Image (cartoon, helix red, strand yellow):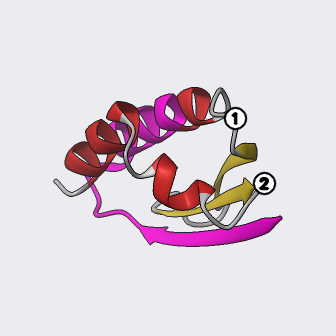
Amino acid sequence: MLVVHVHVHVRLGHVEAFKAATIENARQSRLEPGIARFDVIQQADDPTRFVLVEVYRTGDAPAAHKETAHYAKWRDTSRR
């Protein structure tokens, strides 16, 4: 098992778009066989800060995740 914490600071004005794209990516990611858990956490006292908690079943699963269409859509959307 591999647990990854991704810390993200989103620019003001982009929080809702990032949040929507990230929640959809997490929903799709949970369907992948290599992912045991995928959580999106938004900081209560600073809504521009998020932590993504990704729990993979194997060491190869993160690479497989990054090859999915939903990850590519999230990556392209979240860079704006």
Q: Which SS class for mark 1?
A: loop
Q: Which residues are magenta?
A: 1-25
**Secondary structure category for the residue under label 2:** loop
Nearest the camera: 29 or 20? 29
Q: Position of residue 15 (x, y in %)?
A: 37, 48
Residue drawn where x is 56% and y is 66% of the image: 46
* Residue found farthest to the left: 80
Using a 10 Å C-alpha cutoff, classify the residue at mark 1 as few (fewer than 14 neighbours), some (14 to 19) or many (20 or more).
Answer: few
- Among the two numbered marks 1 and 2 on one chain, the one whose residue lies closer to the N terminus: 1
* 1 and 2 marks in contact (CB < 8 Å): yes
Residue annotated with mark 1: 33
The residue depicted at 76 percent of the width and 68 percent of the height is 2
The residue located at (29%, 51%) in the rendering is 75
Q: Which residue is mark 2?
A: 57
- The correct choice, above or below, for 52 with respect to 4 in the image is above
**Horizontally, is 13 left or right of 61 in the view?**
left
Report the Cα–Cα distance between label 1 and label 2.
Answer: 8 Å
**Is 23 one of the magenta-colored residues?**
yes
- Viewer-nearest residue: 63 or 14: 63
Q: Amino acid at mark 1?
A: Pro
Magenta segment: does it hold 33? no
Q: Nearer the viewer, residue 70 or 52?
A: 70
Image location (x, y in percent) of residue 8? 46, 69
**Circle 2 crowding by C-alpha within 10 Å: few under 14, some 14–19, many from 20:** some
